[in-house]
Amino acid sequence: MSMDDALALFQRFDVNGNGTLGFDELRELLLIIGVPAADVPRLFGVIDTNSDGNIDFEEFIRWMYAQPVDAKEKMLGSTAVAKQLLREIADSLIAKNIPPEHLFASASVRSDGLLSRDELSRILLAYLPDLSPTVLSEAFHLCDWDHSGWINIEEFVSALRREASGLQELTPSTADVSVTVPAGWRYGMQLPVEYAGHLYHVDVPSGHTIGSTFTTTLKLPG
Ligand SMILES: [Ca+2]
Ligand SMILES: [Ca+2]
Ligand SMILES: [Ca+2]
């Protein structure tokens, strides 16, 4: 659940637009997620932590984040919950310093190296056991970028990277490297460049001859 999703939800139920949810406004939302009508007054009191009779956005957010996944799904929809799930998994990998490739490799039991729908579900359920079939299905769609019905490692890694809150900063996907043209190489040729244990091939730019230096941007592997 992103802040935008939560704010859109809050604003949708703030019918009179005064920036807070009154009892009747919150009541509508609670009934939608299946809170019994008799429990609404008590729950309102719990969410209204400063007891001013209104639910401000801060109180709302604090409560929402603590909700079980099925309640979030009813409030925000399966796609938003699936996105949040991928974000949390990506963030927890970052926190533990585990490359997403390792998670993929640990689950990919097929010899062709593709993740099936069930295998992805197993990864996700290991992270959060009470996910609904619709959230699992949405998560699969978010990963299966080319709609092939299978997830390859590039799709898996880029889905997590797309949803992660901080992965981009931690593992830059490009690096600017200074390269000096060695003897025997000239414009129009592809020069092998080793960087961080990987071999890249870069075009020698026009105007550069042996001994001259240029800067190239390498696309780093996931
Ligand atoms: Ca209101
Ligand atoms: Ca309040
Ligand atoms: Ca695919």
Image (spheres, rainbow, N blue to C red):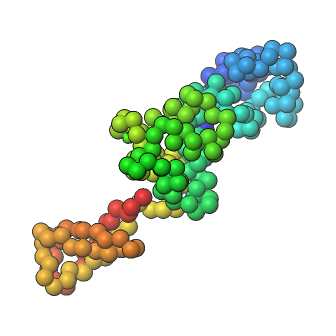
Question: What residue is rendered at 84% in x and 19% in y?
Answer: 39
Residue 179 is drawn in which quadrant?
bottom left
Image spot of residue 79 (x, y percent): 53, 31
- In the image shown, does 107 or 55 lie closer to the viewer? 107
Left or right: 186 as drawn, with respect to 170: left
Quadrant containing the N terminus is: top right
Please state which of residues 120 and 36 is positioned toward the viewer in this rendering: 120
- The answer to whether residue 2 is visible is no
Query: Does 137 sit left or right of 31 as displayed?
Result: left
Pinpoint residue 42: horizontal percent, then vertical percent.
87, 23
Residue drawn 32% across and 75% down? 194
Q: In this view, does 153 lie above or below 70?
A: below
Q: Where is residue 40 in the image (x, y as percent from the top left)?
A: 82, 19
- In-front residue for pair 138/109: 109
Query: Dividing the picture into quarters, in which one does residue 207 lie?
Result: bottom left
Q: Could you say where residue 158 lies in the image, as x and y percent from the top left?
A: 43, 49
Say left or right for 219 vs 33.
Answer: left
Quadrant that contains the C terminus: bottom left
Depth order, front residue of 218/198: 198
- In the rendered image, the vertical position of residue 133 relative to residue 178, given as above or below: above
Q: Is residue 180 visible?
A: yes
State the residue at coordinates (35%, 36%): 148
Q: Residue at x 51, y 37 (%)?
A: 118
Tag count in the figure?
Answer: 0
